Amino acid sequence: MSPFEIRARPPAQVGSTPEPATANRFLSTAAWILFAGGVVAQIAFPYTNGGNLVLTVASVALLAAAVGVDLASTRGGRAVAALLIVAGGGGLLAESVGVHTGFPFGSYDYTGTLGVELLDVPVVVPFAWIMMAWPALAVARRLTGPGRRWATAVVGACALTAWDVFLDPQMVDQGYWRWHHPDPALPGVDGIPLTNFAGWLLVSFVMIAMLDRLIGHRPVDALPIAVYLWTYVSSVIAHALFFGRPPVALVGGVIMGLVAIPLIIVLVRDRREGRQRALR
């Protein structure tokens, strides 16, 4: 073999770094494994009277990691950085301002039982924003279509806020935070003031609008949509059967269902149309 032939050998045969497609497949597989771990942690909640600190942190960490790794596999490092800064940093800022001023959620404070805190906010809280912000955006895009930024921001804000109809009662019941003025509240969602959901809509709208501009579009985002639908179904079941809050299951099921059920209809329709095209 001549020196020229050695130099002409394709890099894929002599290089030691994996091809991008291989790396992306690895990340995608890792994301689904992390998602499965988060699901297992949440399934254990009913057997510990609604969860404990270890399960709460584990489920949030695993699902936040799942959506982050999935985003890395489909959009790259810049998109992950955008999610961390906008959802994580923005969520931390909003919560810290909320604790100290009462704006925009209403007057509340953390009880010191949710782990390490930063700016008087438990560190796990911004990761919860990360965990659901990307799924909310992916769901909104699937429902509104590309290029409709205002519609995407509105639907995404509703998708993210609807999740808190389930989250807040559970966390308050577990003693992780408390509201100073819990009334007026949504019917059936006692103990959580309406100001909380108004604040969530505001923060979520800004957050989703920013992420929509910073994270590129793709035809299919399976994992974040799976995270959203799992959260919906599991939250209804958990509050109805295990957490002693059937009214929350009903109200949350209706409110989050305004996003989740149309999403399911769209997914079923698209799958049916895909099968029909494949048969032609």
Image (spheres, rainbow, N blue to C red):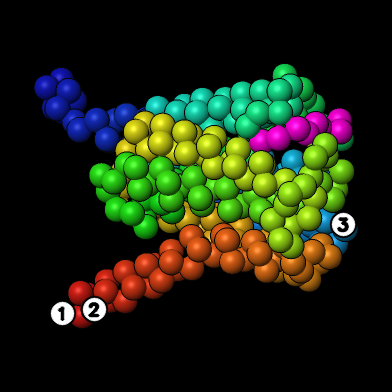
Residue 234 lies in quadrant:
bottom right
Dot 1 falls on a residue whose secondary structure is loop
Residue 218: x %, y % from top left: 31, 47
User: Going by the image, does 152 lie left or right of 106?
Assistant: left
Residue depicted at 87% across the width and 43% down the height: 175
Front residue of 234/105: it is 105
Q: Which residues are magenta?
A: 105-112
Residue 278: x %, y % from top left: 22, 75
- Residue 119 visible, this angle: yes
Q: Amino acid at mark 3?
A: Thr
Dot 2 falls on a residue whose secondary structure is helix
Reading the chain from its start, which is encountered first: label 1 or label 3? 3
Mark seen at residue 48: 3
Q: Give the distance between the C-alpha atoms of the residues marked 2 and 1, in whole angstroms.
A: 7 Å
Residue 96 lies in quadrant:
top right
Q: Which residue is mark 2?
A: 276
Q: Can you say which quadrant of the picture contains the C terminus?
A: bottom left
- Residue 84 visible, this angle: no
User: Image height check: is 127 above or below 165?
Assistant: above
Q: Is residue 201 magenta?
A: no
Residue 116 lies in quadrant:
top right
Residue depicted at 50% across the width and 28% down the height: 86
Q: Give the distance between the C-alpha atoms of the residues marked 2 and 3, in whole angstroms.
A: 46 Å
User: Going by the image, does 63 lie left or right of 148?
Assistant: right
Q: Is residue 106 magenta?
A: yes
Residue depicted at 43% across the width and 66% down the height: 262
Front residue of 11/25: it is 25
